[in-house]
């Protein structure tokens, strides 16, 4: 099973009962016909909000890592245990229990904070009356912009974190391994450059091999990456640059020689390294409890609320950023 498909992930789909409750909860109009019209229109707007998807935001859409809710509503902090397994086997000697080495497990509890974020949309009473009188649907542009804004906010936090809130993203998880790509021919560092020298095909492959060796080394051979996220400019180069004296592209070579690693492009990695340089992220991800984006409160809508002659809908969501009990199973390679 794809570990990003967490069966316990928060439900981000439309809930019709909630929509109807929102639509009839405010006495917006003076007659039943107008109220019924508004209910139906609001149902459509809110339903579109839940169904709206932005696949290019791979973090907030759950395409990169699982989205989980491990912190109960109302709590401002969460925690998890970081485990260290200790134990070295030895050759059998006497067979006595006291001579047999013992394995042990040490665990340290780590905590993280959870913060809520919000955005809203609405209409003036005159807009609603005009829409009803002319039989035109309610304007949905602002509502769609709100959903995009909420998803982008969550996506950015999941990628970069927020130092002011003490939240970490996948590019800066504490204790993750960070290395620099080795220089290639003529000092080339990057896979794709404008007006300069880029790495050769074999040098590109060498970067992948270096990341694999490094993760294996720092985890005592326990973890090997099975995910690799690449900046779009580098990803394009993998389909353009070929292995010397062959017609095999780097992308084809990687697929054939590293079938256990899922490679994908992620827009935000173009400048997510130190000092804004491109970077790649490597991860070992085999289950949702190894690495996830914490979202205690998934996207919700509340209202409509009346404020004078305006009617609005408030949205809310909360996050604790990217969480992992195994930070060394996450590696960032910078291309300075």
Image (tube, helix red, strand yellow):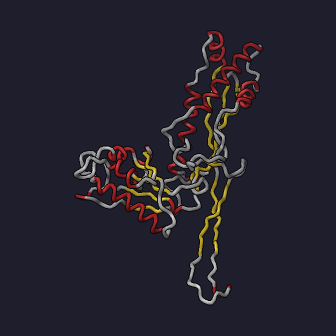
Residue at the top extreme of this rendering: 134
Query: Is residue 276 in sight in this rendering?
Result: yes
Could you tell whether 253 is left or right of 56 in the image? left
Number of numbered discs overlaid on the protein picture? 0
- Residue at 61% in and 17% down: 137
Up-down: is 110 above or below 313? below
What x and y, as percent, mark residue 174? Answer: 53, 61
- Residue at 69% in and 19% down: 38
What x and y, as percent, mark residue 125? Answer: 66, 18
- Front residue of 144 and 210: 210
Quadrant of residue 266 within the rendered picture: top left
What x and y, as percent, mark residue 258? Answer: 41, 55
Quadrant of residue 324 within the rendered picture: bottom right
What x and y, as percent, mark residue 66? Answer: 58, 48
Up-down: is 324 above or below 134? below
Q: Quadrant of the C terminus?
A: bottom left
- Residue at 64% in and 28% down: 47
- Residue at 51% in and 61% down: 329
Quadrant of residue 153 within the rendered picture: top right
Query: Is residue 166 in sight in this rendering?
Result: no
Up-down: is 172 above or below 31? below
Residue at the bottom extreme of this rendering: 94
């Amino acid at each position: 099973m794809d570990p990003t498909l967490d069966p316990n992930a928060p439900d981000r789909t439309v809930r019709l009962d909630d929509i109807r409750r929102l639509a009839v909860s405010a006495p917006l109009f003076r007659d039943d016909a107008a109220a019924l019209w508004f209910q139906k229109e609001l149902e459509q707007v809110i339903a579109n909000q839940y169904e709206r998807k932005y696949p290019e935001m791979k973090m907030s859409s759950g395409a990169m890592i699982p989205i989980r809710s491990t912190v109960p509503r109302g709590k401002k902090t969460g925690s998890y245990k970081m485990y260290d397994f200790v134990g070295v086997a030895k050759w059998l000697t006497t067979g006595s229990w006291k001579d047999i080495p013992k394995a042990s497990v040490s665990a340290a509890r780590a905590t993280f904070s959870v913060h809520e974020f919000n955005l809203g949309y609405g209409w003036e009473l005159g807009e609603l009356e005009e829409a009803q009188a002319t039989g035109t649907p309610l304007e949905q542009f602002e509502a769609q912009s709100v959903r995009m804004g909420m998803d982008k906010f969550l996506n950015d936090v999941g990628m970069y974190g927020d130092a002011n809130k003490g939240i970490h993203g996948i590019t800066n998880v504490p204790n993750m391994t960070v290395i620099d790509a080795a220089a290639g021919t003529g000092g080339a560092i990057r896979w794709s450059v404008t007006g300069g020298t880029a790495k050769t095909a074999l040098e590109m492959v060498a970067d992948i091999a270096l990341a694999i060796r490094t993760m294996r080394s720092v985890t005592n051979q326990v973890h090997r990456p099975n995910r690799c996220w690449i900046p779009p400019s580098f990803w394009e180069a993998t389909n353009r640059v070929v292995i010397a004296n062959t017609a095999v592209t780097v992308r084809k070579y990687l697929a054939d020689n590293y079938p256990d690693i899922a490679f994908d492009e992620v827009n935000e990695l173009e400048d997510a390294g130190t000092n804004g340089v491109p970077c790649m992220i490597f991860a070992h991800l085999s289950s949702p409890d190894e690495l996830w984006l914490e979202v205690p409160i998934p996207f919700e809508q509340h209202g409509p609320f009346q404020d004078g002659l305006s009617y609005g809908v408030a949205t809310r969501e909360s996050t604790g950023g990217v969480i992992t009990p195994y930070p060394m199973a996450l590696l960032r390679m910078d291309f300075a």
